[in-house]
Structures are given as structure tokens and as C-alpha cells.
Image (tube, rainbow, N blue to C red):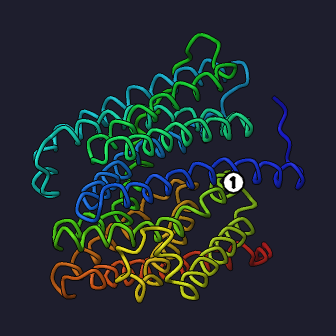
Amino acid sequence: MARVTGRRAILSHTFIVAAALGVGQVLAYIVSVVAARALGPEQFGVFAALLGVILIGSVLALGIQAVAARRLVHIDSADREGASRDILRDGLIGGAAAAAATLVISPLLMWLLRLQGWLPLLLVALTLIPLTWAGSQYGVAQGRESYRRLAAVYLAVGLGRGAGGVVGAIASQSVLGTMVGLTIGTAVGALIGRWCIAPLARAHPVRVSGFFGETAHATHALLALFVLTNVDVLLARALLTPYQAGEYGVGAIIAKVAFWLPQFIGVVLFPRFADQRRARATLVAVGAVAAMGFVVLGVTAAVPWLVVNVVGGAAYAELIPIAWMFAAIGALFALAQALLLTRLALDDRRAVIAVWAAAALLVMLATLVIAHSVSGIASSALLAGATLSVAGAVVAGVEIRALRRPPSPTS
């Protein structure tokens, strides 16, 4: 397949991917909004914590996607379909491994999240199988530069997961029923996604050597980021009262809006982070992500009562004075994610140290330094996000200056 690299094509790809991701993200937020109303603060606190576990567990899907896209670009066209099929099989294997790992640590999660039974965690584990498989589908479509099919898979998984979660929450009015709907919907979406990319993987499998090794390194870095961006919800469940944890879960929805809104920027620009366009692509990515974060923060600060009412309803009015903090948390985490992607494109394995350090800082502040409250945990996340973003921006600035410096004349 010929590659189209013109500016118009890039803008078209950006729009298509952004639209598909946007639909999926809106549906994910609708699930949380509906669940917040259907379950009430205490049950929603449990559901929010389970979503945090799913988000952390699904990081393997992102690692598979990144490595699949990077590897397929460099594979000979004659072997590309076979390699794509092999990657899809690896995605299923990875999903089974993620599910098994979740079940192994389920006793610890039950204690940490104060769950009364193991069935919700079983459903979490089952959900990770189609989510990880979908990650391999994203990577195949992205690596083959088939952005329409990539958007179709994003849309299928987003619609399936969103519809399943909403139906489950409304029909059952319980955490378990909501999780059943979420699991079934995600599986249906992944099956549809596999059908969408079937033309890209019709040949006999061609083994992609070293795939799981590279995936492990990429997943490690993304896992650190996802721990950082979700550990505050888990800490809220562990440190606060059930009612306060529910409040924090609603605030976390605001943070997730700001965090996921610019995701499409990294999807489209990721290949450019790895070649001679790196400096310009980094500036564009950082500028665009920061601008979108300022918009979300500005809207939240201007009409916090409206944002809280839309997200959680009147039961969460106590969040109104601090709603802006959650918008700032999401914006800073989004900036940190963009900066991390610029390092992953170069297979820079040192960047993960900074992310883990930020996560450790958040946990230390929330548990030992700042008072245990909704605003206290939010302040901890805000300080950790700001520290990591500033450090990443300094590194990126130094690198961009070096890349743009004219080469010294040879003697």
C-alpha cells in the first residue's frame, strides 16, 4: 500500500482518528456518568476503582499497539499480511496473560479495594482479554497506515464497551451488573474490530521475532504512566470514606476528560517522533496538548457547577470548589504522556525512571504528607503531574535546541 504523506492526508488522518477516539472517549465518560447516578456515591467508588484496575491492566494493549505499529512499518510488504496475522495472535496471548495476572493478584486487590466478593475482579480479568486483543488490532491498522480501518476499530470497541456499560448500569443498578455489561460489550466490539481489519491479515502467519521482548519494554514505560494517572483513584478508595471515594471518582472523570482528549495527537504524530521530523513534531504535540489542556481547565474554572452537575449530578456539589484541580491534573498528565511518547519513539528506556519517581511522589504525598481528604489526594496528584511535566519539558527543550543547532563545520 502506497504511503500518503502530504499535509492534507495527515490532516485527514488526524480528523478521522480524532473523531473515532472522541466517540469512544465520550461513550466511556457516559458510562461513568450514568454509573455515578445509577449506583450512588458508595457503589460508584467501587466501580471507579475497578475501572482504574482495567486502565492499568490495559496498558499491555498500548504496548502491543506501539510495537506492532513500529515493527510493521519496517517489514517487507510481501510479509506484512502474515506478520499482521501473527501480531493479532500475540494480542490474544497477551490478553490471556493479562487476565491471568489479574486473577493471581485478586486477593491483594480485594483487600486494597475493600471488595466483598471476587466476581467483579473476575469480570475485570475477562474484560482485559478483548481489550488487549483490540490493542493488537490498533497496531496492525496503524502500522499498515490504514487509518480508516484504525478508526473503525476504535469506533467498534468504543461503541461496544459504552453501550454494554450503560445498559448494564441502568438495568442492574449494581456494580456487578455494570461490569457484566462492560465485559460483554467490549468482547463484541473486539470481534467487530477483528472483522474490520481482516483484509490486512489474510496470509499465513509470519513470525515477528522479538515482539514480546520489545512489547515488555514499551509496556513497562506505559504501565508506569498508567499507575501514575490512576493510582490516585485507588488511594481514594483505600484512604477515604466510601462516600468521599465516590466523590473523588467523579472528580477523576473530569481529570480523565482532560487526559484523554488529546490522545489522537500522539497516535498520528508517533511515527514522526522517530525520524528527522522529530523536533517539529515534538513542538506541535506539546503545543497542541497544552492548548487543549488549557481549554478544559478554563471551562472547568469558569463554570465548575455546570461541569460537576453534568458529570455527577447534584449529589456531588461538594466538588464544585475544587473541580478545577481535577482538570489541571488531567491536563498535566496528558502533557506528561505526550512527552513520554517522544521518548518511546526512540526506545529510550531511561524515561520510565522519571515516571515511576512521579508515581512514588504522589503516593508519598497522599499517604504521609498531605491530609487524607478529597482535596488532599487531588493536591498530591497535581504536584506529581506538575513535577513530571516540567522535567519532561526541560529535557525536550534541551534536545530540540540540540537538534536545531547547525552542525559544526568539519576540520
In the displayed structure, 406 sits above or below 260; it is below
> In the picture, which quadrant includes the C terminus?
bottom right
Q: Nearer the viewer, residue 31 or 262?
A: 31
Q: Pointer 1: what residue?
A: 18
Q: Answer with left or right where residue 3 lies relative to residue 276.
A: right
Q: Residues within 10 Å of mark 1 (few under 14, many from 20)?
A: many
Q: Secondary structure at mark 1?
A: helix
Location of residue 84 in the rendering, given as x and y in whole percent from the top left corner: 59, 25
Q: Answer with left or right where residue 401 lies relative to residue 110.
A: right
In the displayed structure, 137 sits above or below 112; it is above
Q: Residue furthest top?
A: 204
Q: Amino acid at mark 1?
A: Ala
Q: Nearer the viewer, residue 113 or 29?
A: 29
Location of residue 137 in the rendering, given as x and y in whole percent from the top left corner: 56, 32
Please give the name of the residue rendered at 39% of the width and 46% of the height, measured from the top-left corner.
170
Location of residue 110 in the rendering, given as x and y in whole percent from the top left corner: 13, 50
In the displayed structure, 11 sits above or below 64; it is below
In the displayed structure, 28 sits above or below 79; it is below
Total number of numbered labels? 1
> In the picture, which quadrant includes the N terminus?
top right
Q: Quadrant of residue 198?
A: top right
Location of residue 271 in the rendering, given as x and y in whole percent from the top left corner: 68, 51
Please give the name of the residue rendered at 65% of the width and 14% of the height, measured from the top-left corner.
202
Q: Answer with left or right where residue 12 lies relative to residue 274.
A: right
Please give the name of the residue rendered at 41% of the width and 34% of the height, measured from the top-left corner.
212
Q: Nearer the viewer, residue 178 or 151?
A: 178
Q: Quadrant of residue 81?
A: top right
Please give the name of the residue rendered at 67% of the width and 77% of the height, measured from the top-left corner.
291
Q: Answer with left or right where residue 109 lies relative to residue 148.
A: left
